[in-house]
Image (cartoon, coloured by chain):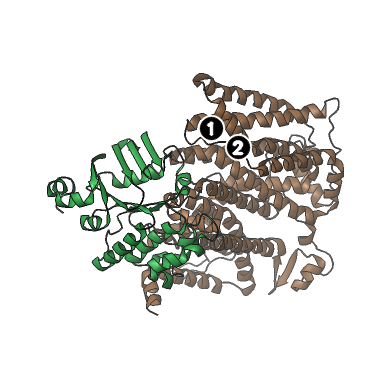
Chain colours: A brown, B green
Amino acid sequence: MNSFVLYLRRNRALLITAAVLLFVLLLAIRGMETQDWVVTLLRSLSVAAVTFLVASGFSLIFGLLDVLNLAQGTLFMIGAYVAWTVYIRPDTFIDILTPICFLVAGFVLLPLWDYFAGRLAGKKVLARLWPWAGLILAGALLFFSLRAYPVTIWDPGIYSQAPGTYSVFAGSGMLLIPPAETFGDRSAVLVLGGILLGSFLLAFSLAGLQNNRRAARGRTGLRLPWTYFVSFLVVLAAGLLVFLYNTSLTDAIVGLGSTWLFFISILVALLTGILLGSLIESSLIRPLYSRPIYQLMITLGLSAVGIELVRAIWGRPEFTMPKPEIFNGTGTGCPATSLADVFRYNCSTILFMDSRIRVYNEIFIPLVGIIVLVGIWILLQRTRIGMIIRAGVQDREMVEALGINVRRVFTFVFALGVGLAALGGALAGPSMGISTAMGESLLLNALIALAIGGLTSYPGAAVGSLLVGLMQQFIIKYGQIGIPLPFLDEPFKPTPPLVPASTVLLMVIILLVLPRGLLGRKE
Amino acid sequence: MVPLLEVRDVHTFIGQYHILQGVSLSVPRGGITALLGRNGAGKTTTLKTILGLTPPRQGEVLFAGQPIHEMRSFDIAALGIGFVPEQRAIFRDLSVEENLKIAERKRGDLRRKQEMIFGLFPDLQRLIHLPGTHLSGGQQQMLAIARALVADNRLLLIDEPSEGLAPVIIEQLILAIRQLSAETTILLVEQNFLVASQLAEDYVIIEEGRSVKTGKMSALIKDEQTIHRYLGAA
């Protein structure tokens, strides 16, 4: 009892703020018809879930690594484009898989390269020069061999072969996968060997560069457990199998139907995010841990480079990602009146309290959001790595002093955070539409959500995202129906520019009352 | 016999500040060695340098004869060095149990050691599920020491254990640390000379980043001039 009173007293400002927010929400709801506020509430949940996927990764990364990953929005967008590719053009995805496997294979053996690079780094000038020479050679080798590898891809410049056109055809169920490219008179063995050799050389040169930077610190003997060789062989074998059974694999994956393809594409987006995240952390962020400003610049730069890269590959205009069959039924029995009907007829909408609710946007996305919320919560609270993360957020040095390699956990968290953002992008593809600009507004939303919730607090990210979603959607809805204000003749209709402004205003007000955000820690 | 820990003419920089300008000390196996000196003399930095948290730019650190000054800090700790930092630095968001569990280096470390730990600090057993925030200063200090005991450590680095604690609790701590020293070697940083003199057999005095005097504690107690000169009024 005593501790409860103490809790109330200590969190007085928080409780009052929460009460005021709740009161405002009730006020907003009272001004609407039932069907209006139910839909608005569900839409808020949808926005909140997508925001949360970006914000939670952001908060995990910032909490443990002290890195503000401004590329989070771009990685969100890349997630959407990757998911689109797997979903609409599985043939391209299968084609790319082999080179990627071969590229990754070289990096799996990184400890081996590290060891060799360490032994090579004897003579001063030579040791400093050879990694650069290796890098150039690897670049050239990869450039030519990757270009020679046949990938069936779209052409954003030609209307009939642009991504948007494929999207439209896929949406109407008339997608024709173009005939596969072939090696022609190029030697497949030479091309694949070139990629593998290039990957070896690249990994080796990078290891050499890193070794020079580290000087002579912490050189230990070769520790290369057999698991590394096994994973190397597995990755290589996977690449080879995909290469050998390319066409039958494409046929099989196309034959799965859009529902399965959709879930596969989401999974691939998540994995791509994880892979990209660990790559970015280990190559770009890690050398800059003692220089926060440079980190900020590099994530900002990455975000710009990412956008241009996506434009170069997928082209400029926006396009849509059709919803999979399971969320797109419109025939008999639709719109569904009960949950059972949703599953029986795969309805795209459901009738609830006289209003149409879109199953994908307003039920599936929030559901995934909740699953991720709970899943990460369990990871943080119930596993050893979660314990290390929570401890590291508070005091990294002490965790290291206990004999724990925090850097490895850093990579894990960064990869997870980016993976979540990419997952968010993949989910948002069908509901928000795909464009290179989709990441920017989301990044802003996520940052605001984090500031509201308290920067390093994981539950804070969830609460902040929810508030941002509610604020936006209610303002949008009131923009349509108007707020009757006592001293105005006409009801006040918030214009669209007020939507982003309103969330910023909310943030400002909350930060004025609670400078650390709703659930932020006192330091 | 090789001393358990040997620090040879170590220089450490933090940013551009030359904090340690030649610290040498050796900690014999068994017993307690006290690291004494005024505020800002470099005692905490010495501990952090040993652990590799602020790696030395020059000089050597040998642990059981093995050079460790070029190793990464988590590898150094894993050799068997436990750290009890100043101001406790327990993990406030973690429960008492998690604070202990996180220090495990092998599965089941805590289970093997819990009898010893709870024998030393019976309070902790009672508080096991409480979050770290809810502990009093003395309880936090006990938890911080207990955390360093979970893994098999051959050397404990304890920084200012008595700082800001009530006299009754300090007495309990002295008892616990003395009991510990029967099994592990301890390098103790302590402002409170009364506490240090009750515990340690050997001492090292640091002044402005340099080690200036070493010897037996029993001799130092009688040497009022040295105490006055390097440690202020005792």
Viewer-side residue, B25 vs A369? B25
Residue A514 appears in view: no
- Which of the two marks, 1 or 2, is nearer to us in this view? 2
- Residue at (65% x, 39% y) in the render: A108
Place of residue A80 in the rendered image (x, y in percent of width and height, measured from the top left): 67, 48
Q: Amino acid at mark 1?
A: Gln
| Marked residue nearer the N-terminal end (1 or 2) | 2
Quadrant in the picture for residue A330: bottom right
Q: Amino acid at mark 2?
A: Pro
Quadrant in the picture for residue B160: bottom left
Left-right relation of B228 to A194 = left
Chain of residue at mark 2: A
* Badge 1: residue crowd in 10 Å (few <14, some 14–19, many ≥20): some
- Residue at (82% x, 67% y) in the render: A345
Place of residue A155 in the rendered image (x, y in percent of width and height, measured from the top left): 76, 35
Place of residue A227 in the rendered image (x, y in percent of width and height, measured from the top left): 67, 44
Residue extending farthest front: B1
Viewer-side residue, A323 vs B143? B143
Q: Secondary structure at mark 1?
A: helix
Viewer-side residue, A5 vs A378? A378
| Residue picked out by circle 2 | A111
Residue extending farthest left: B225
How many badges with numbers are in the image?
Answer: 2
- Residue at (26% x, 68% y) in the render: B168
| Residue picked out by circle 1 | A210
In the image, is residue B171 above or below residue B233? Answer: below
Place of residue B14 in the rendered image (x, y in percent of width and height, measured from the top left): 34, 39
Q: Secondary structure at mark 2?
A: helix
